[in-house]
Image (tube, rainbow, N blue to C red):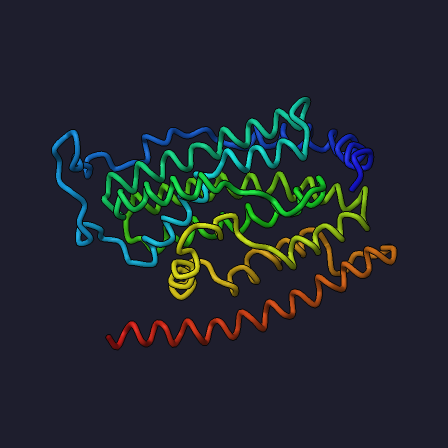
Amino acid sequence: MALAEAERVLGDLEPSVERLLERHLATARDWLPHQFVPWSKAEDFDGPLDGAAWEPQQSRLPRAVQDALVINLLTEDNLPSYHFEIATRLRREGAWGAWVHRWTAEEDRHAAALRAYIHACRAVDPVALERLRMSHMATGWRADWMSPLHCLAYVSVQELATRQAHRNTGALCGDRAGEALMARIATDENLHMLFYRGLYQDAMRLFPDEAMAALADVLCGFQMPGAAIAGFRARAARVAAAGIFNLAIHHEHVVLPLLRALGVLGMPGLGPVGQQAQERIGLHVEHLQTQAARAGELYARMNAGATHR
């Protein structure tokens, strides 16, 4: 998308940003990360404070939940990269800038609270976690998309996916404090998704063909931002098998609700570009459903094998 066209999109959508930001500020409830951390469980680690070293048996969380926490936290850690990618494709002043900075401030709470919870509960190896953080953040994250519409399409999908990942991690952790924290973070992600989805609804109305094409590109090539984490595939497989986040959840709780809310598959009046993109999305949904069914069979075998060990 040419610079002039991108500026036109951003200018035409700015009134929507103002309206949705006002709605968000009226709806969002501020919260204090330190109040969600079970500090009474914490004790000093080995090192300058001469505490006890972490040992695997200290974690009471299932392996898949530990994996999910690592993925979720390291994903949140890369916030500087996300801020840069979004701010450089949108605007850093006016309503756009006010939203991007507000979003960044709210997202920053998530990593702070998750890390404190993990350390207080000795949920995972803190040394391995820190080494992964350094490696992941040193690599950074870079978006494949360039246009504002691709940016907005991606975050609309990603925020909804992240909401599900945090919520399901909390539900399976077997810990009241953990469940409350994950639910609180998931609430933030849901509000962010509602902002971006509302903005994309207006984009679909103003730029139907271009917005449909951008959405098709994003959906058909979607990857979670944590996919570059070292060891991601093995962790993601265990997370998927446990039912925390997998293709079936992505299909049923992310892609289909978003398409229904945006009215994508039944949208009339599209030109050739929009119609082609609409067909791509329809075929992708069918393919995703098939993939999810096959993956479900694999997860069942994985879980059966784990049970019989």
Could you say where residue 118 lies in the image, as x and y percent from the top left? 29, 42
Q: Residue at point 60% right, 36% down? A: 85
Tell me: 225 left or right of 110: right
* Image quarter of residue 286: bottom right
Tell me: 9 left or right of 236: right
Tell me: 72 left or right of 190: left
Q: Residue at point 65% right, 59% down? A: 220
Placement of the N terminus among the 4 image quadrants: top right
Look at the picture and state if 302 lies above or below 137.
below
* Image quarter of residue 255: bottom right
Q: Nearer the viewer, residue 44 or 133?
A: 133
Q: Nearer the viewer, residue 176 or 284?
A: 284
Q: Nearer the viewer, residue 189 or 237?
A: 237
Placement of the C terminus among the 4 image quadrants: bottom left
Q: Residue at point 56% right, 39% down? A: 192
Q: How many marks?
A: 0
Q: Residue at point 37% right, 34% down? A: 112
Could you say where residue 233 lies in the image, as x and y percent from the top left? 43, 60
Could you say where residue 110 lies in the image, as x and y percent from the top left? 42, 37
* Image quarter of residue 196: top right
Look at the picture and state if 303 lies above or below 97.
below
Could you say where residue 127 lies in the image, as x and y percent from the top left? 26, 43
Hey, which residue is sitting farthest top in the picture? 94
